[in-house]
Image (cartoon, rainbow, N blue to C red):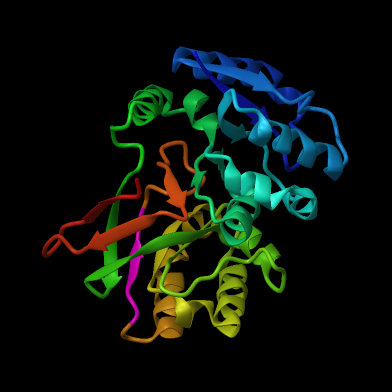
Amino acid sequence: MRRVGVVGCSDPLPESRRAEFARLLDALRAAGLEPTVAGDLFAPAPPERRAAALMDYYCDPDVEMIFDVTGGDLANEVLGRLDWSAIARADKPLWGYSDLTCVLNAILARAGRPSVLYTAWNLVREDAARQARDFCAALAGGGALFRLKAAFVQGERMAGEVVGGNVRCLLKLAGTPFFPDVRGRILLLESLSADARQFRAYTAQLAQMGALDAAAGVLLGTFTKLEAQGGMEAATAHMRRLLGANKPLARTRQVGHGADSRAVWIGRPLRLERAGEGEDACASSR
């Protein structure tokens, strides 16, 4: 079996998820992986210990990939404690989402290594059967896990390496050495908790930083709270105004916090092109 590490760079897991975590480890084993867990992910740990646990797996030649299964607020605490040269030498991806957006993009910015925006929790959520099938196929080098459908709002195509992820967590990197270079890249944005005002605030900051002008295009994933409030169409129109008429903008339902979300490589090329009138663009980020 292929050995993988399981870590927690962000908030500790709540006690209520212990049984679900056991099922997650079983799901990884069922996929042909041998998970090893970095200590007690349910107990608070100082950032230096969380960073050391991640580095231990990066430096272990027997570990093929690393899964972070935490989220919340604290992942950026580890950034100043990571060995970027060791990460650059390690040929293994970190998988994570939500708050791990800040770590995935920092790895690209400082180590030049791609990571995977995806949560292993999908293997035990509502869409577990399909996720497990696609996950196993991806481990074998194929399948639909990295295959996205998107609808263009304006423009016909966009191409470039992907940066971004959860917009709130990405912006924690603003003004630091860990923010990724957006020039010529696709800026992917999604959110769990942003409402209409927060969407405007986050996108205003990105515009003021020059990120929207620099990007090759913007790909909007799911915005869970905003969509539940019926505000996504107005938010998309607002983004069009910020981008101007010439910058490509597309939307996908397949990246975000939903149990049916697929995976995206942060730091690898993605090409989206309008397939035809009324048809979604299809692309793979592998």
Q: Nearer the viewer, residue 141 or 218?
A: 141
Whether residue 22 appears in magenta in the rendering, the answer is no
Q: Position of residue 130 (x, y in %)?
A: 35, 26
- Quadrant of the frame with the C terminus: top left
Residue 70 position (above or below residue 164): above
Q: Is residue 72 left or right of residue 125?
A: right
x, y (%) of residue 1? 49, 13
Residue at 19% of width from left, 64% of height from top?
Answer: 274
Task: Give the image location of residue 88, x and y in percent.
Answer: 59, 49
| Rendered view: 187 above or below 258 | below
Q: Is residue 155 left or right of residue 82?
A: left
Q: How many marks?
A: 0
In the image, which residues are magenta? 247-252
Q: Is residue 169 above or below residue 24?
A: below
Residue toward you, 26 or 183: 183
| Rendering coords of residue 236 (x, y %) | 41, 71
Residue at the image point whose x is 34% and y is 23% from the top: 133
Of residues 3 and 272, the one drawn nearer to the viewer in this rendering: 3
Quadrant in which residue 205 is drawn: bottom right
Identify the residue at horizontal 49%, vertical 44% (top origin): 116
Residue at far left of view? 276
